[in-house]
Image (tube, rainbow, N blue to C red):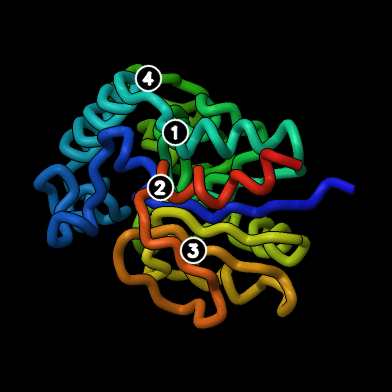
Amino acid sequence: MQRHIVVLTGAGISAESGLSTFRDNGGLWEQHSVYDVATPEAFARNQELVLRFYNERRRQLAKAQPNRAHKLLGELEKHHRVTIVTQNVDDLHERGGSSNVIHLHGELTKARSSVNPELIYNIGYRDIKPGEKCEYGEQLRPHIVWFGEEVPMLEKAADIVRTADDLLIVGTSLQVYPAAGLVHEVERDVPITVIDPGETAGVSRARVIRKGAGEGVAEWAAKFLAR
């Protein structure tokens, strides 16, 4: 029988593809405070700044490539059932070969209505322009879960974690809630592995591989890819 491997990923896995993270820069994301570009209040206050910020992130993403960790997790699907639950808003997991990806915090390659969060548009890597409106006549916004907003995919992700036969955590310090709470949904006898070169919190019984994402996933995945 195929094992169900659930993988929780954070910014550390995308950092190896050159995408920067705000938590590694003193609360700044590309020199912007998250409160200026990642809250509903920021969008209401300065739509042009917020749109420009995410347009730049989208252009950066278009040039980035999936790294060794992304590709290994994609390869894993040939041998096991794999579900990726990511805090990342990039599409590097999909481009690395993963077909079952849940994005907790939204997706850069999509836009949505600013009045109806269920009205979502695939935009790829193009800009969202000021004045570009949804079907309700309101400005389009990035399909990103900002600080202070609910995480709509959280309950689905929790249900999936409860069905895991193995739980792998890559590139996250487990300090961002509510996503960090997912680790507590796993069944008590399920093996947990954390791959992160820095300090992690919240999983006392986990096996820890203190390496970067690519090297760590390669070490962890060897036994699964050999089956």
Label 1 vs label 2: CA separation? 8 Å
Label 2 vs label 3: CA separation? 10 Å
Q: Give the structural element (helix, strand or loop) at label 3.
A: strand
Q: Give the structural element (helix, strand or loop) at label 1.
A: helix
Label 3 vs label 4: CA separation? 32 Å
The image quadrant that residue 65 belongs to is top left
Label 1 vs label 3: CA separation? 17 Å
Q: What residue type is disc 4 on?
A: Tyr
Q: Which residue is mark 3?
A: 194
Q: Horizontal and vertical percent for residue 96? A: 52, 28
Q: What residue type is disc 2 on?
A: Ala
Pointers 1 and 2 in contact (C-beta within 8 Å): yes
Pointers 1 and 3 in contact (C-beta within 8 Å): no
Q: Give the structural element (helix, strand or loop) at label 4.
A: loop
Residue found at x 52% / y 44%: 117
Q: Horizontal and vertical percent for residue 133? A: 39, 25
Position of residue 89 relative to residue 186, above or below, is: above
Label 4 vs label 2: CA separation? 25 Å
Q: Earlier in the sequence, mark 3 or mark 4?
A: 4
Residue at the outermost bottom position = 204
